[in-house]
């Protein structure tokens, strides 16, 4: 792809961000040849366990160590802090056959470490530029990505479940995105874990309420026992069958929001392919 796409999945805790991220990854793996980076940007870090990925370290650990060394005056004049952090971030990158994986983890410590944050932002920009699509499983805080480059098309997906709280959280996240000046080119809402009976009766109503709030619905993913079962048994959702209802819905969503074809993406962005 000529366009580098960075897709952030946010939403209230427990709405299904990690589940949706995984199913979007599955759609990309099955229907594209894009070079893919998956980032766990939620401090809770559920993705490695859900996908059975072994991680040795996280970006947060490396940044925390650097902060501590700066505070302790333990960095010699000759060492470039930027080079050191960059090296450590690349060490944290898990290279897989089908996609690469990076765990952001948690940065410990108080106060503003603007230097470390700025360097981290720069490094992440450099890394994501190596991939066609970067998928970020985020929390509701939109941390890590208050940054701006023109190379990327940033898309924000906000996951809601059938609760008023998650709907309100979606509106807050959209407002927060504006405040931190992340220029998302598109923002979509994905409704998740809706009882199938409710989907039929309430989808028009949901769409209208979202539109009234200035949000756009990408699709509704049904509540599904097999998803819960896979989670409980520690099985990867990447192994769900093609004809699974949630898989099919998320495939449709991925197509609709332009993840599967660059033509569709450019169409959504109001540009014609060069
Ligand atoms: N469509 C769904 N059907 C059934 N269970 C779901 C569905 N989506 C998510 N879950 C379950 O809900 C719980 C929270 O999902 P998760 O993706 O971890 O949420 P988040 O990342 O937003 O905290 C998990 O146990 C997951 O298996
Ligand atoms: Mg999660």
Image (tube, helix red, strand yellow):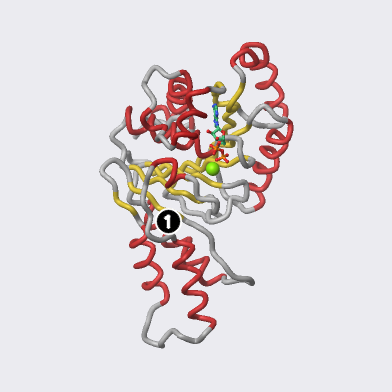
Q: Residue at x 35, y 56 (%)?
A: 93
Q: Is residue 21 above or below residue 119?
A: above
Of residues 140 and 123, the one drawn nearer to the viewer in this rendering: 140
Residue carrying label 1: 125
Rendering quarter of residue 32: top left
- Left or right side of 14 for 46: left
Q: Where ligand 2 lies, by image quadrant?
A: top right
Q: Residues within 10 Å of mark 1 (few under 14, many from 20)?
A: some
- Asked if the residue at label 1 sits under 8 Å from ligand 2, the reply is no
The residue lying furthest to the left in this view is: 97
Q: Is residue 76 left or right of residue 159?
A: left
Q: Nearer the viewer, residue 181 or 267?
A: 181
The answer to whether residue 99 is above or below residue 115 is: above
**Is disc 1 placed on a helix, strand or loop?**
helix
Q: How many marks?
A: 1
The answer to whether 143 is drawn above or below residue 36 in the figure is below
The residue at the point 29 percent across, 46 percent down is 96
Q: Residue at x 52, y 29 (%)?
A: 228
Q: Nearer the viewer, residue 184 or 226?
A: 226
| Horizontal and vertical percent position of residue 109 | 59, 70
Question: Looking at the picture, how far across and down is residue 12, in whole percent?
Answer: 64, 41
State which quarter of the image contains the C terminus: top left
Q: Is residue 218 visible?
A: yes
Residue reaching furthest to the front: 233
Q: Residue 223: where, in percent of width, then height?
A: 56, 23
Residue 142 place in picture, x, y as percent: 59, 50
Q: Is residue 70 left or right of residue 261?
A: right
Residue visible at 47% across and 73% down in the picture: 65
């Amino acid at each position: 792809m000529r366009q580098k796409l960075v897709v952030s999945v946010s939403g209230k805790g427990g709405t299904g961000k990690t589940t949706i991220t995984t199913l979007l990854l599955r759609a990309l793996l099955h229907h594209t040849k894009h070079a893919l980076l998956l980032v766990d940007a939620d401090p809770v870090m559920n993705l490695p366990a859900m996908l059975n990925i072994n991680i040795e370290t996280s970006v947060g650990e490396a940044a925390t160590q650097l902060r501590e060394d700066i505070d302790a005056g333990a960095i010699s004049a000759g060492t470039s802090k930027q080079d050191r952090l960059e090296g450590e971030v690349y060490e944290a990158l898990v290279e897989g056959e089908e996609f690469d994986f990076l765990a952001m983890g948690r940065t410990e410590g108080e106060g503003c470490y603007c230097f470390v944050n700025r360097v981290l932002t720069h490094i992440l920009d450099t890394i994501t530029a190596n991939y066609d699509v970067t998928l970020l499983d985020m929390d509701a805080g939109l941390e890590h990505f208050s940054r701006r480059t023109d190379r990327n098309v940033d898309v924000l997906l906000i996951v809601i479940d059938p609760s008023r709280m998650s709907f309100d959280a979606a509106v807050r996240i959209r407002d927060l995105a504006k405040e931190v000046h992340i220029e998302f080119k598109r923002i979509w809402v994905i409704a998740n874990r809706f009882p199938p009976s409710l989907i039929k009766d309430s989808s028009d109503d949901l769409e209208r309420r979202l539109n009234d709030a200035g949000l756009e619905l990408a699709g509704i993913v049904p509540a599904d026992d097999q998803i819960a079962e896979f989670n409980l048994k520690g099985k990867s959702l990447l192994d769900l069958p093609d004809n699974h209802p949630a898989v099919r819905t998320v495939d449709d969503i991925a197509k609709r929001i332009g993840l599967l074809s660059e033509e569709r993406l450019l169409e959504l962005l109001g540009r014609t392919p060069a």
